[in-house]
Image (cartoon, helix red, strand yellow):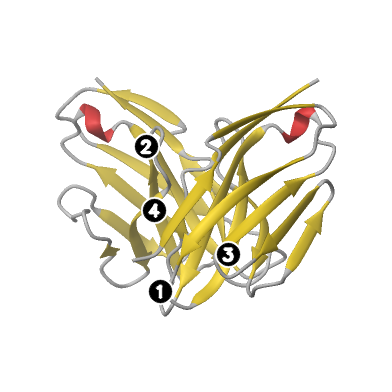
């Protein structure tokens, strides 16, 4: 199955600043997904990143707040802009893995835990 | 809108004490129900996919079952290393995205 590396694994940020999270996959994938996991809440899809096109955002998420880049088939970044304490969360990168785990199964990175003060 | 509700929120078991976790769902045209395990500080790890009512899958001490309204994750004779948060998710209709429940935090005491 795909191996996903995320950086940073955790960070403490000041209110009003922005942070970019990187996601590297060890194989080429068409779609990459960014999820948010807030304390006590379910995993929520932020957006889908396709190489060569604009990211598709879910309801409640906007590009100005969460700009995404997808420069090639193995890499993506998510920026959390103008952060507030409400943005404190774990952000996870994922890809569909059609390998050993089976078609249409999501494989996740370890996540990036952001704390905004 | 697809919905997933997991119960209980937390479950404490003694080692060897079997139990079940519940995942109730509403979805338009189920295209897969997924179980994941998540350890602290890690991303979710895939366990099972179920596609149709009556389907069952097993892996070591875990067995997942599916009906038209819910799925159960049965844990037989659990060990402390089974302690984790178990997440349920569904994919429905023509949607490619997964809708997750909030998870069940399982603690198995030695």
Residue B56 rendering spot, x and y as whole percentages = 75, 65
What's the CA distance linking mark 4 and mark 2? 13 Å
- Of badges 4 and 2, nearer the viewer stands 2
- Of badges 4 and 3, nearer the viewer stands 3
Q: Secondary structure at mark 4?
A: strand
Task: Determine which residue is flagged by label 1.
Answer: B95
State the residue in front, A99 or B63. B63
Circles 3 and 1, Cβ within 8 Å, touching? The answer is no
What's the CA distance linking mark 4 and mark 3? 20 Å
Residue B74 rendering spot, x and y as whole percentages = 74, 49
Q: Secondary structure at mark 1?
A: loop
Task: Determine which residue is flagged by label 4.
Answer: A34
Circles 1 and 2, Cβ within 8 Å, touching? The answer is no
- Of badges 3 and 1, nearer the viewer stands 3
State the residue in front, A32 or B48. B48
Residue B71 rendering spot, x and y as whole percentages = 62, 59
What's the CA distance linking mark 2 and mark 3? 22 Å
Task: Determine which residue is flagged by label 2.
Answer: A38
Q: Secondary structure at mark 2?
A: loop
What's the CA distance linking mark 1 and mark 2? 23 Å
Circles 4 and 2, Cβ within 8 Å, touching? The answer is no
Dot 2 falls on which chain? A
Task: Determine which residue is flagged by label 3.
Answer: B33
């Amino acid at each position: 199955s795909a191996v996903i590396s995320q950086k940073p694994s955790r960070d403490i940020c000041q209110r009003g600043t922005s942070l970019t999270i990187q996601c590297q996959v060890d194989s080429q994938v068409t779609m990459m997904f960014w999820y948010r996991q807030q304390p006590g809440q379910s995993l929520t899809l932020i957006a889908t990143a396709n190489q060569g096109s604009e990211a598709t955002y879910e309801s409640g998420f906007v590009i100005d707040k969460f700009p995404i880049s997808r420069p090639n088939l193995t890499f993506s970044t998510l920026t959390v802009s103008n952060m507030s304490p409400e943005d404190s969360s774990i952000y996870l990168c994922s890809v569909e893995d059609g390998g050993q785990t089976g078609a249409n199964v999501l494989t996740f990175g370890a996540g990036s835990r952001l704390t905004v003060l | 809108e697809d919905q997933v509700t997991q119960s209980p929120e937390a479950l404490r078991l003694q080692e060897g004490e079997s139990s079940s976790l519940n995942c109730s769902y509403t979805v338009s045209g189920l295209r897969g129900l997924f179980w994941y395990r998540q350890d602290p500080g890690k991303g979710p790890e895939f366990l099972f996919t179920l596609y149709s009512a009556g389907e069952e899958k097993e892996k070591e001490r875990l067995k997942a079952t599916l009906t038209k309204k819910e799925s159960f994750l049965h844990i037989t004779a659990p060990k402390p290393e089974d302690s984790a948060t178990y997440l349920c998710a569904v994919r429905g209709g023509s949607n490619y995205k997964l809708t997750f429940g909030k998870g069940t935090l399982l603690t198995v005491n030695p």
